[in-house]
Image: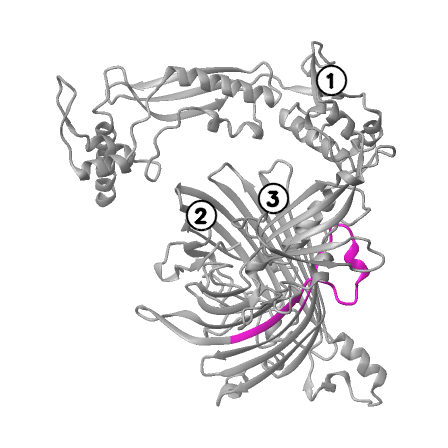
Amino acid sequence: MKKYISLFIISTVLLFFVSCNSTRHLGSNQYMLTKNVVKVTDLRDDRLDDLYYLVRPVPNKKFIDVFPFKTWLYSTFQPTVDTLTGEVIKDTKFKKWARGYGEAPVLLDSAQISYSVEQLKIELRNKGYFNAEVTPEVHYRKKNKLASVTYYVQANSPYYVQNIKYDIDILRYRRLILQDTNNSELKSGNIYDATQLLREKDRIINSIRDKGYYHVPNNIVYFIIDTIQKENANNAKKLVDIEIKVDLSRITDTTIFEKMMYRYKFNNIYIYTNYDPSLNYATEPMDTITFIRSKKDPTRYFFITPQSVRKTKKNGDYKFFRDYRYRTLSDVMYTKKEVSYARSNISRSYKRLNDLRNFRTINIECEEVKSKLDTVAKIGYLNSIYRLSRNKIHSFAAEADVRSDKTNIMLSYSNKNIFKGAEYFNINGYFGMDILFKKTNKFIIYSNNAEAGGEISLDFPRLFIFRKTQNIESLRYNTQIRVGTHWQRAASLYQRLILNSAFVYNWTPTYQINHSLAPIDISIVKIDKYKGFDELISRYSTAFRKKYEENVLVTFKYIFNYNVALPDKRNSFSLRIRLESSGLTVCAVNALLSKSTKPLNSWKFFGLNYATYEMTDIDLRYYHKVNKKNSLAARFNFGVGIPLFNSTVMPFEKSFYLGGANSMRAWQFRTLGPGSYYSSERNERSGDVKLEMNLEYRGTIYKFIKYGVFADVGNIWLIKRDVNMKNAEFQFNRFYKELACAAGAGLRLDFNFFIIRLDIAFPIYDPNDPEGERWVNKLDLKKLYIPLAIGYAF
């Protein structure tokens, strides 16, 4: 206890010294600004949480939000100055470096306070608080020459939108705008918000342009705001009317007025597949290839390549170098000839080109074809110009997933355009080990499990078979074929080899939703049991022993992902649902074609037993942004697998497990559960039912140094009763009593591109301990678990 008191006293004295030293060169009427605070005194509105960032000046940054280290450096290493003349008498390179690295103290400034008050009032008016009052209050610590400012905000009652009117003088645009009002962000009854007006203006302009009106200036749309000085029945609510004006009163150029009346169509397409902004395309010799897709598509596609990027033969003659198959790119360009101009077509083309993963930058512009301007029908044409700067086609990568319970190293090679059709080829290999802590009189790190494997995959930027589906608006898609192998060694017990192949469709109808469908996914599991393994597991039930048999999995898989940020932009959530059905197709074929009267559990697939089961796994995550530096994260995960027909247990590869750096962090990898089954032996724990809930508060200490405080609750269970594993099966009348509980805290080093996470977790309730010993009444250092990992747990 004395050590902690001494540390507190030393820290306090150091803080006092640093603060005083930072201000010793200030004048008699100068004060160093240490903090700005904005307090809204009369209401709670999440939209006002960021008012603090409008206040000026911004105080000096502090190391771990406590010590103004850079200011101390700047003030401490000032040059020696003649007090009479002000001339520098002595200075050194080190002092100059220290001042350059440091920061001059930010001073209290009355003019900046007045400016901040006005900025706060402007922002409050923009948020609907037209009668807000802002009162600054300066707090001085004259002895230390320090000051802080608190801005007290009395927002008063906000104004609510009552009536929304449209006044549209341009007849060509009137119907288009009125037909699209359902998509308006402005709603009667909402609090007035100026940012909504700006978004509404952009929406109206874009809706007109999407109907072919290419030359629509932004200034034809503006708003008239009318505050209504009357009260509602409750004598409290203040109201505002909004009139949306669309007219030509702000257009002074007659040529623009004429072009506004023309509806435009797309014409031909010009494509620079290897665009280099450093080249002078006005003088650079070019090769141009004209491509026509089909008779149904009248568009002419001009593929333009600078001669300087072509390959050459040994004799010096040029050989034309084609970057891509022409159909690959033309298939994802939606600015086709005779199609009415719409920004949405350009956006869709951009998205689909970006999905090819071949281009570093994509620039799409339109150029008017003046020779095709029809002045009678008021129709014009636009050529589309695509400037595509390529990514590196070949790439090598090395990744490491380092955790305190499991470590993996992966090497991979990828080719983004292997067959000139933007096919994405990837081959990878990995090696990993489970890292376990053996408890004796000391903690000893050892590894008795290892795994290795690799995978070859090929992604095609189209959906095989479903050709017509690819024309659906905004749909993004690809087809993947992959084969792989996975080898695992479990101590001195057995080796497992898994051969896998799959055919997968992936499609994304919106930014929030993603689907993945594998109509066929085949895995062959071979097991090499070491001497003594059968004897070791003979004490367990027949169902448990079947988990370690060779089998074949012929699986149908579907994965649904939904990610959405709520309108307030402070909350978001994600939902992932995984469905698997294995062996049912093979069962049906066997039942129809086989003349054998053998029972279901004796059917074979290429000489091996095949597993039949149904499985679902639901993962729901919620994130709440408390402020710019702190957030709250929660996860709910539930999964269940049911063996059917040919199988009495779930395959080991498909069983659920908990523990480790990313789930139930107070337990080591695969060591929790099932249920309240107790065993003094340490072995891999797996189950058929999983339930896990996590809650974590994430905060910032200083810049990239962050922290987390968390709680984990969960367990796994068997779906069927096992006579040799008491209380391991799921039962509704007791499962809630078998939920393990843990808590902990940790540090995170957030470098944006990756995060290093170190947690300290301890069990609060362990259902696998003997009855009467499950609640942890005191902190036992032997039960602490310290997982290290890359990235967040969820």
- Magenta segment range? 453-480
Q: Position of residue 521 (x, y in %)?
A: 68, 73
Q: Quadrant of residue 461?
A: bottom right
Residue type at mark 2 is Gly
Left or right: 16 as drawn, with respect to 196 = left
How far apart are the two marked residues, 1 and 3, measured between alpha carbons? 43 Å
Give me the residue at 36% from left, 28% from top. Answer: 59
Of tags 1 and 3, the one toward the viewer is 1
How far apart are the two marked residues, 3 and 2, measured between alpha carbons? 19 Å
Label of residue 610 in the image: none
Q: Position of residue 541 (x, y in %)?
A: 60, 80
Which quadrant of the rendered structure holds the N terminus? Answer: top left
Name the residue nearer the viewer: 267 or 328.
Answer: 267
Mark 3 and mark 2 in contact? Answer it, CB < 8 Å.
Answer: no
The residue indicated by pointer 3 is 572
Q: Is residue 107 magenta?
A: no
Name the residue nearer the viewer: 150 or 689.
Answer: 150
Q: Position of residue 208 (x, y in %)?
A: 77, 33
How far apart are the two marked residues, 1 and 2, measured between alpha carbons? 57 Å
The residue indicated by pointer 1 is 249
Of tags 3 and 2, the one toward the viewer is 3
Label of residue 708 in the image: 2
First of labels 3, 2 by sequence position: 3
Q: Is residue 469 magenta?
A: yes
